[in-house]
Image (cartoon, grey):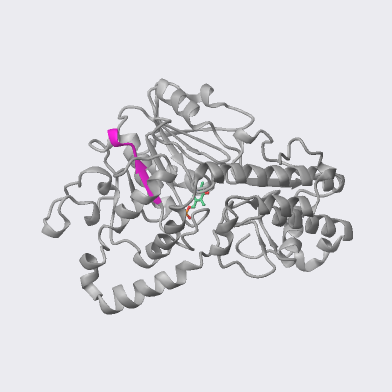
Amino acid sequence: MSLATSAPHSIDRATCAALDAADPLARFRERFALPEGVVYLDGNSLGALPRATPGHVERVIAEEWGTGLIRSWNDAGWFDKPAVLGDRIAPLIGAAPGEVVLGDSTSASLFQVVTAAARIRPGRRVIISECGNFPTDLYVLESVQELLGEPGRPLERRLIDDDGPTLDEVLDGDVAVVVLTHVNYRTGRMYDMAEVTRRVHEAGALMVWDLCHSVGAVPVELNAARADFAIGCTYKYLNGGPGSPSFIWVAGRHHGVARPPLTGWHGHARPFDFTVGYEPADGITRFRVGTPQLLAVAGLEASLDLWAEVDLAELREKSLRLTELFICLVDARLAEWGIEVVTPRQSARRGSQVALRAVGTLDAGDGYALMQALIARGVIGDFRAPDLMRFGFAPLYVTHTDVWDAVAALEEILRSGSWREPRFARRGAVT
Ligand SMILES: *Cc1c(COP(=O)(O)O)cnc(C)c1O
């Protein structure tokens, strides 16, 4: 059934139930421990809990830690976990075996790869990113600019923006590295990875992709796009759990020359020689720093078992069906209340999330109270200042009926005005 060809008014809850019944990914939903009565549309911020995770983490704690103790570094393969799990992430991002390793936080890993990339282009003094990037990415770039600049003269940063300047306007022979987030965290807009990478290479610069909102949301083809470096997090669509580690990808052709700034013992060629001098390990291993967070790694390991079964073409197809359904229903039922879709309508330019904005008689900031009212009804999305209500559609566990119920709940909240209750305007520390 194609939504594009059915008129919005002909879609009802039964249509959604029929789409669920025909969904080839439907079987994955029961592999997640979602609370009863909750429509979870925030898997782009923190993925849901796979049912297998608590048992696996408990086994790692009781057997590998409790019984195995220090022996588990060898017996349970603790030392190699970051590389072994990296190899299991590789097929999700179009990478080859031996090109991916687990890192620390995404922010720390971004620092590792952007610095390493800029060092491959010495003499070029500019780093490009974008205004709308996730702020931590921009904060990290400031450190790289300082580290690789001269005293009092940091590297220059040029930021592109939707209203200009464009990438082509700021790319020239001074640019060392371009750092972009593939799927925008606020709007869900997706770049054409191969096309952008090609333009960056034409200017002689290297391309770093942030895949936080891409991995597990859309198929990614890093090697086919000839990209240079990438990082991403595993606690969003990959469902690794709060604080699960980032991953780092470096194209094989850079492995011999890449020099990360944080040189710890787990990135050493022979860490157990305990020598005084640092000597980088071969390959992607040199991007490791210190002891991996093995309990968090265990959470990711359980979730990657599930990802090994997922067909990414089916994932993308379902993701587009969910976001298209949501957009259709918002247009048909919420436009009259002053709710507008911000995310690109062209499917090739969209990740797996949709952002809405309150316009007309509503204030931009009203989106916050609207989202709190929705959450109080069990429909969980989030709000990104100053004005975006964000809804993530994790294809492994979100159903078409969930989409229907979410739009129906928002319509009811707008119609009744219940969102104007003062309790919905109070802001917590995390939005
Ligand atoms: C979620 C996200 C991060 C998170 O960084 P952490 O270091 O894991 O907190 C960074 N960049 C982007 C684009 C993100 O979406």
Residue for point 81% across, 42% down = 8
Q: Is residue 225 above or below residue 389?
A: above
Evaluate whether residue 55 shows in this view: yes
Evaluate whether residue 150 shows in this view: no
Q: Position of residue 283 (x, y in %)?
A: 24, 43
Residue for point 83% across, 47% down = 333
So how many labels did they put on this image? 0
Q: Of residues 333 and 263, which is closer to you in this image?
A: 333
Q: Of residues 371 and 168, which is closer to you in this image?
A: 371
State the extent of the magenta-drawn residues as a range: 247-253
Q: Position of residue 368 (x, y in %)?
A: 72, 56
Residue for point 35% across, 71% down = 60
Residue for point 62% across, 32% down = 162
Answer with left or right where residue 35 lies relative to residue 209.
right
Q: Where is residue 113 in the image (x, y as percent from the top left)?
A: 36, 42
Answer with left or right where residue 355 lies relative to residue 52.
right
Answer with left or right where residue 179 lies relative to residue 253.
right
Q: Which quadrant would the N terminus be assigned to in this image?
A: top right
Q: Is residue 303 above or below residue 314?
A: below
Per the image, is 250 magenta?
yes
Q: Where is residue 59 in the image (x, y as percent from the top left)?
A: 37, 74
Q: Of residues 9 and 185, which is closer to you in this image?
A: 9
Q: Of residues 348 and 19, which is closer to you in this image?
A: 19
Q: Is residue 1 above or below residue 262?
A: above
Answer with left or right where residue 264 lies relative to residue 338.
left
Per the image, is 234 magenta?
no
Within the image, what quadrant is residue 321 found in?
Answer: top right
Q: Is residue 328 above or below residue 35?
A: above
Q: Which quadrant would the C terminus be assigned to in this image?
A: bottom right
